[in-house]
Amino acid sequence: MDVQKATGSNPDGYAGDETLRNTVTISRTKNSRHGAVTPLERRLKALGYYHGDIEADHGRTPCFGPGMESAAKTYQKENDCISDGEITARNKTWKSLLGMI
């Protein structure tokens, strides 16, 4: 639901076409401070890939930095996605993280 809220989707807790359609590319160079960074940090941390701080929990602006890039690359590699550290809009990494595949 946090990703849905951050992307302007209906926050119903079920990722579907609307949610995927509203995703944006997030990387160190694209939308690195987007509202979906915190939910991505939380998801990758829960899955054991991200080991950094959740900036929002400390009152800081979230930022997709080197730690998140590394976590994303490892997740992508282990989940049959292109391992480039970029969570690309509407593509396989988003689908995987959202539980759509």
Image (spheres, rainbow, N blue to C red):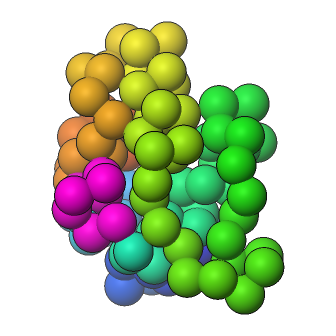
Residue nearer the viewer, 73 or 3: 73
Q: In the shown orientation, is residue 87 left or right of residue 38?
A: left
Quadrant position of residue 55: bottom right
Q: Can you give x and y, in whole percent of width and height, for residue 81 in the image?
A: 32, 20
Residue nearer the viewer, 57 or 36: 57
Residue nearer the viewer, 45 or 18: 45
Highlighted range, magenta: 25-32
Residue 28 magenta:
yes
Residue name at image x 54 percent, y 55 percent = 40
Residue nearer the viewer, 18 or 93: 93
Q: Is residue 100 above or below residue 26?
A: above
Q: In the shown orientation, is residue 31 left or right of residue 41?
A: left
Q: Is residue 66 above or below residue 39?
A: above
Q: Can you give x and y, in whole percent of width and height, for residue 29 in the image?
A: 22, 58
Residue 59 seen in render: yes
Q: Which corner quadrant holds the N terminus?
A: bottom right
Residue name at image x 47 percent, y 67 percent = 63
Residue 17 seen in render: no
Q: Can you give x and y, in whole percent of width and height, for residue 85 in the image?
A: 33, 35
Q: In the shown orientation, is residue 91 left or right of residue 51?
A: left
Residue name at image x 71 percent, y 64 percent = 54
Residue name at image x 30 percent, y 52 percent = 27
Q: How many marks?
A: 0
Quadrant position of residue 22: bottom left
Farthest residue toward the front?
66
Residue 67 magenta:
no
Q: Is residue 2 above or below residue 45?
A: below
Magenta span: chief secondary structure: loop
